[in-house]
């Protein structure tokens, strides 16, 4: 039987603050299998990013159990089991695009020749071939986010964690990057956990949609998508897509009412 890549059992997280405890996550149970594209959607402050940070070992649950490839989040982080794409591209302005992508490879002490090969490969994967010598300020916002994705892919981790990477982009650029991300996922077969506030984005991208309630963050629905893996943008006009978006919207409403 296949083991989940990410396995959460009754995960709780409470932050201690000067104003008292803040219950960020409560009883989160979820299995993410190899090759899944899982989107997390819910209202602001519901714990979507917090749960992603728990997976990444950047926050520590105060209850329950969480494993990544059978390892603790800290062990998975140390073994470079995942790449992380933040809401902002977070590129260093004094480094070229190739230099930014190179940074994690330098930290991991990859051989110089292998670094060059990996940089060239991921630039091609994200359609930035020929832009390695440019600086971030010379690229559009969408291109900067693609460079951020390339950096996360450079060391070839099997898991990609993405925290609302396209939220600040206009709709036209966002649509294009959604298409490109699906194509990238199809080519690489990565397991992707993706945080979003957009119902159409969650429905378009995902094999599984996780609906979360307001704080304390709980999973109120896990929806397996019936849509085919090959998805042109026009699929958003189909009855199947509209019905799935409606179910997600109803799940969000029920979570608010709970």
Image (cartoon, helix red, strand yellow):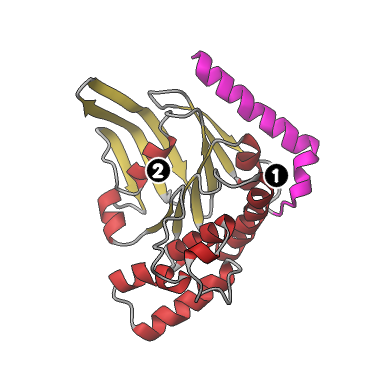
Residue 71 is situated, as x and y percent measured from the top left of the image, at 30, 52
**Residues at discs 2 and 1 in contact (Cβ within 8 Å):** no
Res 227 label: 1
Magenta stretch, residue numbers: 230-258
Q: In this view, does 83 lie above or below 18?
A: below
Residue at image location 19% in from the left, 23% down from the top:
18
Q: Decide if residue 6 is on the left or right side of residue 71.
A: right
Displayed quadrant of residue 29: top left
Residue 35 is situated, as x and y percent measured from the top left of the image, at 53, 55
Residue 138 is situated, as x and y percent measured from the top left of the image, at 54, 66
Displayed quadrant of residue 69: bottom left
Residue at image location 47% in from the left, 75% down from the top:
119
Q: In this view, does 139 lie above or below 176?
A: below
Res 52 label: 2
Front residue of 18/209: it is 18
Front residue of 16/143: it is 143
Instruction: Give how far apart the Cα atoms at labels 2 and 1 are.
Output: 25 Å
Q: Does the magenta stretch include residue 246?
A: yes
Q: Is residue 155 above or below residue 212?
A: below
Q: Does the magenta stretch include residue 212?
A: no
Do we see residue 72 in this rendering? no
């Amino acid at each position: 039987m296949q083991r989940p890549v990410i396995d959460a059992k009754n995960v709780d997280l409470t932050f201690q603050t000067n104003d008292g405890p803040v219950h960020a996550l409560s009883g989160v149970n979820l299995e993410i299998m190899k090759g899944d594209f899982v989107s997390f959607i819910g209202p602001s402050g519901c714990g979507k990013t917090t749960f992603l940070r728990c997976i990444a070992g950047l926050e520590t649950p105060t209850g329950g159990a969480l494993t990544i490839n059978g390892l603790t989040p800290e062990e998975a982080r140390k073994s470079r089991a995942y790449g992380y794409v933040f809401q902002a591209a977070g590129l260093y302005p004094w480094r070229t695009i190739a230099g930014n992508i190179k940074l994690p490879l330098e930290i991991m002490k990859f051989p110089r020749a292998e670094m060059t090969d990996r940089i060239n490969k991921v630039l091609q994967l994200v359609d930035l071939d020929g832009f390695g010598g440019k600086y971030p300020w010379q690229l559009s916002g969408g291109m900067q986010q693609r460079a951020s994705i390339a950096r996360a892919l450079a060391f070839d981790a099997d898991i990609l964690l993405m925290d609302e990477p396209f939220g600040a982009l206009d709709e036209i650029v966002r649509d294009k990057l959604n298409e490109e991300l699906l194509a990238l996922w199809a080519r690489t077969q990565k397991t992707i956990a993706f945080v979003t506030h957009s119902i159409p984005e969650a429905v378009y991208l995902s094999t599984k949609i996780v609906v979360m309630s307001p704080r304390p963050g709980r999973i109120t629905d896990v929806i397996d998508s019936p849509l085919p893996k090959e998805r042109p943008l026009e699929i958003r006009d189909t009855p199947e897509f509209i019905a799935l978006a409606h179910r997600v919207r109803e799940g969000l409403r029920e979570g608010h009412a709970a």
